[in-house]
């Protein structure tokens, strides 16, 4: 008895000693935590095997999936039976003697590998069964025939608007997209079928747009639609339904009580935030419940450029922040003196756990119980477990178990970039971030800053290679942007959830709390916009899996090299300074290093992809801009590099999307005097877009007059086309291609005597008519080749203008074959030096006469050597 008591005392002393020695700041810096052994990784290969097998099986045919499952099962059975057979079998040492190789360690490894194969078989089986469901029944059959039918559909997601995209010279119309499940099919022959098939509905955004956007999940609709198969294999839909017409939806069944309640709460949040500033009004519902319906393309682009898009979607961090109110600071939930609100209001641990579960359930209901929300809730609970217990050793198995369950429940997650990013970020915060934070503390970085910096660096290191796969870019401002955003996420989330709750019972109080939440939400928008506006915010990087692998290897080399680098503090400070210079890019320093833009430039053609955007220097920081390209981002970047802050006149040669869709980028942060456009408002939708954008910015829209002459400083120009009056007979044949042949054509002269002819997208008929009407064109120094250098050019006009420099604006690897080799050869045969943006990048023109120079920006950036081409 005494012996046992002594052993117990020694155990207690040993345990106390271990606890005293292991008293380090827990995850998040919240107090003492246990010193733990190695991280338990046994479940990680099981989850990875199920994940990989499910990702493969959702896109494989049925028999390949069956074969893969059979191989995995046979391999697992062989490994499991191998050990017992050896133990039962004899040897030359006699029956019943174990074979020398059948050690416990080898049997354990065989069992582990058998578990991996069984999980792979389970993942492939689940994915195969889900994929087989999509290929059965009348819906996929009708989709293969591109048939029309009447269907009854249960809505399974919130409606969302597609982002406007430029395709060629047209802008794809905005549509309403929502997920659904077909439950009843009426064929054209009158036959009726009951089924269950997930589909994607695409609805034109017409007169019934508002009613469609108000639909709640579980609402049942009757729609007439044309069915089509999914664009890519492995999509989680049996068909795509292109709904006929643009009228309001035909509702045949109301949503469930839970969804109506969640919809009322979300609507109350939108109402309470109605009076906030535009950015806060857009962000707060998205930050709280994932409602991004108010977030415009410009704000979304800013969040993408700074890698803050996780704040626009439902995230596990949202749930974690709210639950922190119950348990208090990290690492204290397992202590006698707990933190948070729970002990202060007399809640026991068991009641606190139940309250946390109730909040989690409410979170899932309000934010919609779709796979992305379930994923966020699961990852949030894992992170909450880390914060509550301070024990990381058991958290990686918990995360692996969550991944395993979610992949088996919904195999489509195995191909989701969002799911991959969530798992990687959570894993990095649980494993890498604490070690890096501790290393920063040892180097005298303050505790809170070390924790935030370690988390941001860890998340960026593991997530950036995945972002590169589909975005082909690396954000250089992601870490500082996330650090600054972290200051506002918690107050915005807590106040936002408070607003959500109050809006259901007392709207004035909810509006007051929303006003408070608007300050941190506005801070988030400011961080995103400011970071995205920096010249070096993003770095182009090869996309696809090879690009991601290259960035992952580079990151690993940098991390390993930094650990063995002498004078790490000094080197780190130097690297940070160089990164700051690369991001800010002070104009004098950037010009000295890169030679771009060249001093004294008079004309520049921006690299905007498959479109047009050119700039004429008007003195100081002002310039006349001709066309805006297909995307606001590249034209805005080009104007910032050129130092243009004032635009007295923006000329839009015609209303095709590849010339006008980038209009918001020109208007962004610049004083624009007026927008001048052609008189032919075709296509009508894009002309209306220009009118709306100009009106919203308070910029007048005027029409280009034939023969009009203008001067701004030393810059003067004449409108050559479209023409009217005495030349109408010659112009009558030039109406074959509508908007292209209505392009505003300018003849420009600079103070130094440089002449430029900007043709827009004129086609051969209009080019011939232009030469007939203006017989005094004569040779010019610079020609902006019409229609991106297409094969449709008039040789007669080329012979008349005889340019010394021909500039072609075209997108890299565009599907139209622009510029045409025939056009390029004709220009060179006429003595012109030809430069093109798809190969040479942006091009600036300097000087005049014999001192005329063309400076391709692509050459400077590609080789680091200033490339000047005398003409």
Image (cartoon, rainbow, N blue to C red):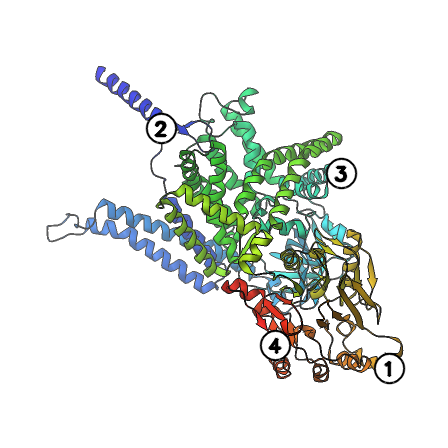
Q: How far apart are marks 1 and 3 (CA)?
A: 57 Å
The answer to whether the residue labelled 4 contacts the one labelled 2, judged by CB atoms less than 8 Å apart, is: no
Classify residue 723 as left or right of residue 529: right
- SS type, badge 3: loop
Instruction: Give how far across and how far down residue 734 sits, in percent.
Output: 79, 79
Q: How far apart are marks 3 and 4 (CA)?
A: 57 Å
On the image, which quarter does residue 226 sit in?
Answer: bottom right
Residue position for label 3: 275
Instruction: Give how far across and how far down residue 511 sits, in percent.
Output: 73, 33
Query: Would residue 156 be seen by someone viewing this image from the given angle?
Result: no
Which callout, 3 or 4, points at the residue further toward the start of the chain? Answer: 3
The answer to whether the residue labelled 2 contacts the one labelled 3, judged by CB atoms less than 8 Å apart, is: no
When the figure is inspected, residue 603 is found, relative to residue 645, above or below; the finding is below
| Label disc, if present, on residue 833 of the rendered structure | 4
- Extreme left residue here? 93
Instruction: Give how far across and how far down residue 340 sits, in percent.
Output: 54, 25
Residue position for label 2: 22
Classify residue 625 as left or right of residue 427: right
Query: Would residue 91 be seen by someone viewing this image from the given angle?
Result: yes
């Amino acid at each position: 008895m005494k012996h046992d008591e002594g052993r117990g005392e020694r155990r207690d002393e040993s345990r106390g000693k271990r606890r005293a020695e292991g008293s380090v700041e827990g995850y998040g810096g919240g107090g003492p935590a246990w010193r733990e052994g190695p991280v338990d990784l046994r479940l990680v290969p099981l989850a990875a095997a199920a994940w990989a097998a499910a990702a493969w099986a959702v896109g494989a045919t049925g028999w390949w999936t069956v074969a893969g499952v059979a191989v995995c099962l046979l391999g697992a059975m062989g490994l499991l039976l191998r050990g017992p057979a050896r133990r039962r079998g004899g040897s030359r040492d006699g029956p019943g003697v174990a074979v020398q190789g059948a050690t416990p360690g080898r049997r354990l490894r065989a069992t582990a590998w058998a578990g991996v194969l069984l999980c792979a078989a389970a993942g492939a089986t689940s994915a195969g069964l889900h994929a087989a469901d999509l290929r059965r029944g009348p819906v996929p059959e009708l989709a293969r025939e591109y048939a029309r039918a009447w269907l009854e559909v249960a809505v399974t997601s919130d409606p969302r608007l597609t982002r406007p995209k430029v395709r060629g010279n047209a802008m794809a119309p905005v549509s309403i997209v929502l997920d659904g499940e077909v439950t009843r099919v009426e064929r054209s022959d009158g036959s009726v079928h009951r089924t269950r098939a997930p589909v994607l509905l695409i609805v034109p955004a017409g007169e019934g747009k508002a009613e469609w956007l108000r639909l709640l999940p579980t609402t049942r609709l009757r729609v007439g639609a044309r069915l089509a198969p999914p664009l890519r294999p492995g999509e989680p839909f049996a068909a795509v339904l292109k709904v006929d017409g643009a009228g309001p939806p035909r509702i045949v069944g109301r949503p469930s009580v839970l969804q109506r309640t969640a919809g009322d709460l979300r609507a109350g949040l939108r109402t309470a935030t109605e009076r906030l500033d535009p950015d806060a009004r857009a962000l707060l519902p998205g930050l709280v419940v994932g409602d991004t319906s108010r977030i415009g393309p410009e704000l979304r682009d800013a969040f993408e450029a700074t890698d803050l898009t996780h704040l626009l979607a439902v995230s596990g961090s949202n749930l974690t922040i709210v639950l922190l109110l119950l348990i208090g600071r990290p690492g204290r939930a397992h202590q006698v003196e707990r933190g948070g609100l729970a002990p202060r209001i007399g809640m026991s641990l068991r009641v606190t756990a139940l309250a946390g579960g109730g909040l989690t359930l409410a979170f899932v209901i309000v934010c919609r119980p779709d796979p992305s929300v379930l994923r966020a809730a699961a990852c949030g609970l894992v992170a909450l477990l880390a914060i509550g217990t301070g024990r990381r050793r058991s958290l990686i198995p918990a995360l692996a178990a969550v991944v395993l369950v979610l992949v088996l429940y919904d195999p489509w997650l195995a191909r989701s970039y969002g799911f991959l990013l969530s798992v990687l970020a959570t894993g990095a915060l649980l494993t890498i971030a604490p070690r890096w934070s501790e290393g920063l503390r040892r180097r005298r970085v303050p505790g809170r800053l070390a924790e935030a910096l370690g988390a941001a660096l860890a998340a960026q290191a593991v997530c950036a290679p995945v972002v590169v796969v589909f975005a082909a870019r690396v954000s250089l401002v992601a870490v500082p942007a996330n650090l600054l955003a972290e200051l506002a996420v918690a107050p915005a989330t807590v106040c936002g959830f408070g607003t959500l709750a109050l809006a259901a019972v007392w709207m004035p109080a909810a509006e007051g709390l929303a006003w408070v939440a608007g300050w941190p939400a506005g801070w988030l928008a400011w961080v995103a916009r400011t970071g995205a506006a920096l010249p070096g915010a993003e770095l182009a990087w090869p996309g696809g899996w090879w690009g991601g692998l290259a960035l992952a290897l580079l990151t690993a080399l940098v991390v390993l090299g930094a650990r063995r680098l002498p004078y790490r503090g000094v080197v780190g400070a130097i690297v940070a300074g160089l990164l700051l210079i690369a991001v800010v890019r002070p104009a004098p320093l950037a010009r000295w290093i890169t030679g771009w833009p060249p001093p004294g430039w008079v004309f520049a053609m921006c690299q905007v992809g498959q479109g047009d955007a050119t700039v004429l220097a008007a003195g100081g920081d002002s310039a006349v801009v001709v066309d805006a390209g297909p995307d606001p981002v590249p034209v805005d970047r080009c104007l910032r590099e050129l130092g243009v802050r004032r635009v007295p006149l923006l000329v839009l040669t015609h209303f095709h999307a590849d010339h006008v869709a980038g209009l918001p980028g020109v208007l962004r942060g610049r004083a624009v005097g007026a927008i001048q456009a052609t008189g032919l408002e075709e296509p009508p939708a894009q002309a209306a877009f220009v009118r709306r954008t100009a009106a919203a910015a308070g910029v007048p829209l005027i029409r280009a007059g034939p023969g009009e002459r203008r001067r701004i400083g030393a810059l003067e120009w004449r409108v050559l086309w479209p023409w009217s009056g005495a030349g109408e007979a010659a112009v009558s044949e030039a109406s074959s291609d509508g908007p292209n042949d209505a392009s505003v054509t300018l003849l420009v002269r600079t103070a130094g005597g440089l002449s430029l002819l900007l043709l827009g997208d004129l086609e051969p008929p209009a080019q011939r008519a232009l030469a007939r009407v203006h017989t005094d064109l004569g040779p010019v120094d610079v020609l902006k080749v019409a229609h991106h250098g297409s094969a449709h050019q008039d040789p007669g006009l080329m012979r008349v203008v005889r340019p010394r420099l021909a500039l072609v604006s075209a997108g890299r690897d565009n599907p139209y074959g622009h510029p045409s080799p025939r056009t390029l050869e004709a220009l060179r045969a006429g003595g012109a030096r030809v430069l093109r943006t798809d190969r040479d990048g942006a091009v600036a023109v300097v000087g005049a006469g014999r001192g005329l120079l063309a400076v391709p920006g692509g050459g400077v950036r590609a080789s680091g050597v200033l490339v000047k081409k005398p003409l």
